[in-house]
Amino acid sequence: MKYREIIGRMTLEEKASITSGKDFWQTMDIKRLGIDSMFLSDGPHGIRKQAAAADHLGLNASVPATCFPTAATIANSWNEELGEKIGIYLGKEAVSQKVNVLLGPGTNMKRNPLCGRNFEYFSEDPYLAGKMASSYIKGIQSLGISACVKHFCVNNQEERRMAIDTIVDERTLREIYLTAFEIAVKEGGTKTIMSSYNKLNGTYTNENMHLMRDILRGEWDYQGVIVTDWGGGNDRVAGMLAGNELEMPTTGGETNVDIIDAIKNGKIKEEALDECVDRMLELIFTTEEVYKGPRSEFDVDKHHSMAQLAAEESIVLLKNEENILPLKPGTKVAVIGDFAKNPRYQGAGSSIVNPTKLDNTVECLEDVDIVSVGYAPGFKRYGKKSIKLVKEACDLAEKADIVLLYIGLDEATEAEGLDRQNMKVPQNQIELLEAICKVNPNIIAVLSCGSAVEMPWISNIKGLMHTYLSGQAGARAVLRVLCGDVNPSGKLAESYPIRYEDVPSCSNFPGKEVSVEYREGLYIGYRYYDTANVKVRFPFGYGLSYTTFEYTDLKVESDKVTFSLKNTGDAFGAEVAQLYIGKSSDMIFRPKKELKGFKKVFLQPGETQTVTIAFDNKSFRYYNVATDSWEEESGEYKITIGSSSVDIKLRGVIMREGTIATAPYDRIALPSYFSGKAACVEVSEFEILLGRKVPEAKWDRSKPLGHNDTIAQCQYAKGGFARFAFHLIAFAHWVLRKIGKISTANIIMMSIYHMPFRGIARMTGGAVNMPMLNGILMIVNGHFFKGLSHLLKERNKMMTASKTKKTIVEATKER
Ligand code: BGC
């Protein structure tokens, strides 16, 4: 232990106090020992430092900061250098605001396009996500502070995120859901990790010994701090045993007492607490270093320009019929769509940034060489079709050569805490598109949203530019790409299925009650579409350019591939060359091919470069559940270089001498997995893959409700009062939606409806403690008077304790 001496001078109470929040965002300080408090702040694509009222839902304002494009956007750049640069800019802003730990990046997999938080995550591919996450981490941490990669792990749905039990087999867990985190730990060197809210195979991730001890601390040798997601702590003692150093936010000291009691009664050894304190001190002392000197402000304009550059490199051109783009100088355009005036540039929830500036298309038009014939909103963001707005838009469209139609998803549809209901663009926008098409077929749609949507309307447009959520400077970036000042080079970091029903997890998403079963196993995103031969609208890795590229001369060597890449067009541009590796196998099932490397190459017209992509320790490995380790099959591997996952430019092979390992599967028993047609796996087959029975997925409605049951379960509570409260909440939600207050309705869903009861204690900073919560649960379970009296008694105890300034330890001893 590095801080043995100082830890030796700490009382047990002080040690415990270091492992939980002082308030919503800060850790405890101990002045007499020179230990400062640390400030933790969201993240991930801008700083959300709340100076006054604090929350984790993005409700109260924060100090202005640059809103960079979200992770889903930047992933399309496939540019690690860019990620690192953004990390540096984020780090600078964090330092200027005295933030020690920046809560990001988020690197969960996009298992299903409807996950409400996909806009905050990088990709459906763990390799790409891991590389991008680690580039951010390196950038942020180069400033001396800490990044915090989140949400570890299998947090792939928002509905019931604080209680859902994710059922996933070990190989899928390792290869798909952990690899990005592994890269973030080993290559990014993250100093902090946030455990997710959900359970993994029956145990909360924060308490999951296999995940936290065997894998994270053991195999990956992670030496940093683990912080709970806000209010995600369940059993503090179990968390600490699994190695959770920090619980956030404060519980008013209540869970510190749990730790102290556990040490006194021998459940935890004091050395285990000391180890956690040691890691906390390392994080505090090292991230405080930077604040010893004077703090400098950041340059708002420079950072805004960086946000623009980041957006320019991440925009994806999806359709360019008749080379309608780039727009010729002087083209007469009609700018239509509410998003042109009120940009959709970031997501909703804890990541919401209060931008320093905000560009919009209408105001930026004068900076580019096109002529606007006017702007018309065309539709109401949150409403039904408006005949008046459609007519106005069509009249304008008639006057122009080209229509720039700004469409997308609204802020309430893609939000933390909730999943989307479908993959559709709102109907009133499609109706507008169809109406405009009749008067002017030269439509270029500019799409703003943070995840994949269905596009049955695509034949009605000639150009399609996907901006994702491009940050505060996105509007100007889009115009520059439309006009050819910037050549688009973004490529999709996720697949675009034709319809939602094609998504492999479609029938197992989201988990509605107790659990969610990852029956599709390894086959998420392109791994499924590619292997099962399911056509997609746009494949993973796809994106157009205003120039063309030629791939030649593939050489496969033992440690790398090299090939030549030439810009054969007449514009400067960048190509993302992608290395996929596959193998036919009788021993294990595997996706047809998987991304194992990529390189973004910038080329002048006519220029050729030799591109090298090295193999690494992930290129050929697979996780063998019989030997419980990473193995490599011997034999021939197919090496493919693609411009996307389906547009393969070069092919080669390599022979590898692998490891000798027991075959882990019975091929006959796992037909869906061996064929890759894993969209409708029967439970019996999934159980064979899992190696055990799946737990009951439905709530046991006969049992009394407990700490980890959610408020939503009050619908069948024994207590009439609880059932009434449930209907009241459901009614309030319904009314709010009806009157158009969708964001407020969403907040009810995420912060009340889907919250487990324990959240009442964990999220109220000690105002409601666990004994009081027990009283509430008695009421919920039909013992109204007994529960009320218990609640009041416990409340009085707490009040008396705080009046007489008893320490929390003494007060709790009396409980
Ligand atoms: C989110 C985290 C966030 C935290 C603090 C939680 O609800 O899941 O991503 O960092 O709140 O705002």
Image (tube, rainbow, N blue to C red):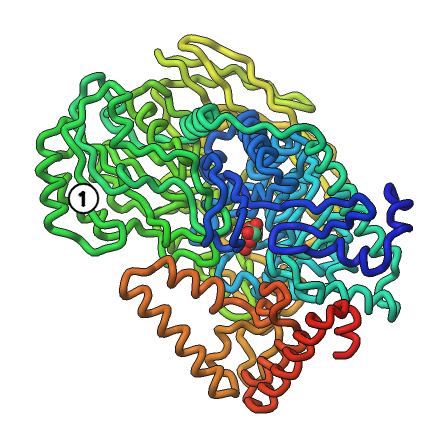
For the point 15% across and 32% down, which residue is it?
374
Q: Give the vertical position of 687 relative to 271 (above or below).
A: below
Q: Which residue is mark 1?
A: 378
* Quarter residue 693 falls in: bottom right
Outermost residue toward the top in this view: 606
Q: Is residue 44 left or right of residue 225?
A: left
Q: Answer above or below: position of 98 versus 210.
A: above
The residue lying at 22 percent from left, 47 percent from top is 430
Q: Quadrant of residue 758?
A: bottom right
Is 500 displayed left or right of 558 in the figure? left
Q: Nearer the viewer, residue 44 or 37?
A: 37
Residue 673 at least partly seen: no
Q: Residue at x 51, y 87 (%)?
A: 719
Binning the other alpha carbons within 10 Å of mark 1 as few (below 14), some (14 to 19) or many (20 upward) gives many
The C terminus sits in image quarter: bottom right
Classify residue 543 by image quadrant.
top left
**x and y percentages locating residue 250 in the rendered image:** 65, 59
Towards the viewer: 732 or 436: 732
Amino acid type for the residue under numbered disc 1:
Gly
Q: Is residue 796 above or below residue 97?
A: below
On the picture, is 25 further left or further right than 312? right
- The picture places residue 553, in percent across and down from the top left corner, at 53, 15
x then y, percent, for residue 611: 56, 17
Asked whether 245 or 4 is in front, the reply is: 4
